């Protein structure tokens, strides 16, 4: 009789500890998803430093050093992104040139978050503060809408259409009209690793140019609100690879 009672006690204790561990893992994965920055429907205050390296044809390259400071308030977030750009034009008699690039400001509202579904609307404004060759020379706006679906606590899918257009420009520059469709499939691990597969469709209406970009993302939580992220953007069109270049991005984030 005593052994039977002891067995029941251990069984109950085992179930409790198992459920407790599941609950802890779920909470950890939810936190990782928010702090990773890959889900636009999750709002958080953060400071990000990232370096963007564009490997172009003819020995040309470009390095962008960008700071992204985002303040999250309830379901709203406000971001500011200044950057310093260094270029190499590949000529034998030239040196690296470094100047300030454009300044970006973004607003996002995750207006619907319920069960497995979430929606967020955002707009990013680009101020043409960069000199010619270091900035886009457009005062532009890029609105977007993100829908995310949570498959389970470690996996989600999202889709995000964007449309980039100018608000003001010099008459010598062409019209800015670019549609982008981003999709995300993200997996989060209890060990702190996260992996994202992001295929992207880009259509430039003014220049009649269509491209398909593949962008795998790998990141790791370091603890204490810090995480590191690496991104590779690989265009499938040779012209894009030659002009824009293959992009490798490394970043470190501090979440608050």
Image (cartoon, helix red, strand yellow):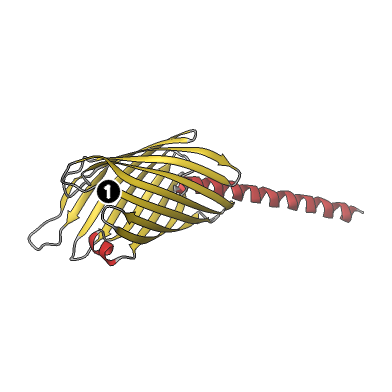
Mark 1 Cα within 10 Å, few/some/many (few <14, many 20+)? some
Q: Name the residue located 55 percent from the left edge and 50 percent from the top edge.
A: 149
**Looking at the picture, how far across and down is residue 68, in whole percent?**
34, 42
Number of dots carrying numbers: 1
* Quarter that holds the C terminus: top left
Q: Point out the residue furthest to the right here.
A: 1
Q: Point out the residue furthest to the top here.
A: 73
Q: Do we see residue 84 in this rendering?
A: yes
The quarter holding residue 127 reads top left
Q: Do we see residue 42 in this rendering?
A: no
Q: Point out the residue furthest to the left here.
A: 93
Above or below: residue 201 compared with residue 34? below
Q: Name the residue located 29 percent from the left edge and 46 percent from the top edge.
A: 66
**Looking at the picture, how far across and down is residue 139, in whole percent?**
25, 40
Question: Could you tell whether 171 is left or right of 10 in the image?
Answer: left
Question: Could you tell whether 177 is left or right of 15 in the image?
Answer: left
Q: Secondary structure at mark 1?
A: strand
Q: Name the residue located 36 percent from the left edge and 51 percent from the top edge.
A: 179
Q: Nearer the viewer, residue 14 or 108?
A: 108
Q: Nearer the viewer, residue 240 or 188?
A: 240
Above or below: residue 238 compared with residue 114? below
**Looking at the picture, how far across and down is residue 117, in whole percent?**
56, 46
Q: Nearer the viewer, residue 203 or 106?
A: 203
Q: Nearer the viewer, residue 250 or 82?
A: 82
* Quarter that holds the N terminus: bottom right
**Looking at the picture, how far across and down is residue 47, in whole percent?**
38, 41
Identify the residue under disc 1: 65
């Amino acid at each position: 009789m005593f052994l039977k009672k002891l067995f029941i006690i251990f069984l109950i204790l085992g179930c409790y500890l198992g459920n407790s561990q599941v609950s802890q893992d779920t909470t950890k994965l939810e936190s990782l998803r928010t702090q990773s920055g890959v889900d636009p429907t999750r709002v958080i205050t953060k400071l990000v430093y990232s370096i963007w390296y564009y490997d172009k044809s003819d020995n040309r390259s470009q390095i962008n050093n960008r700071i992204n400071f985002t303040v999250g308030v309830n379901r709203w977030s406000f971001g500011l992104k200044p950057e310093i750009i260094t270029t190499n034009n590949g000529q034998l008699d030239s040196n690296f040139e470094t100047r300030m690039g454009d300044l970006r400001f973004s607003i996002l509202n995750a207006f619907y978050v319920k069960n497995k579904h979430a929606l967020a609307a955002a707009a990013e404004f680009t101020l043409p503060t960069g000199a010619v060759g270091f900035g886009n020379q457009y005062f532009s706006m890029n609105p977007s809408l993100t829908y995310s679906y949570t498959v389970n606590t470690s996996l989600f899918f999202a889709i995000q259409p964007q449309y980039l257009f100018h608000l003001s420009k010099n008459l010598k520059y062409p019209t800015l009209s670019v549609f982008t469709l981003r999709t995300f499939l993200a997996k989060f691990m209890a060990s702190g690793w996260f992996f994202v597969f992001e295929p992207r469709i880009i259509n430039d209406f003014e220049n009649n140019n269509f491209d398909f970009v593949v962008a795998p993302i790998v990141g790791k939580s370091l603890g204490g609100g810090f995480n590191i992220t690496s991104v590779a953007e690989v265009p499938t069109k040779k012209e894009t690879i030659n002009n824009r270049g293959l992009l490798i991005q490394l970043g470190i984030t501090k979440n608050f």
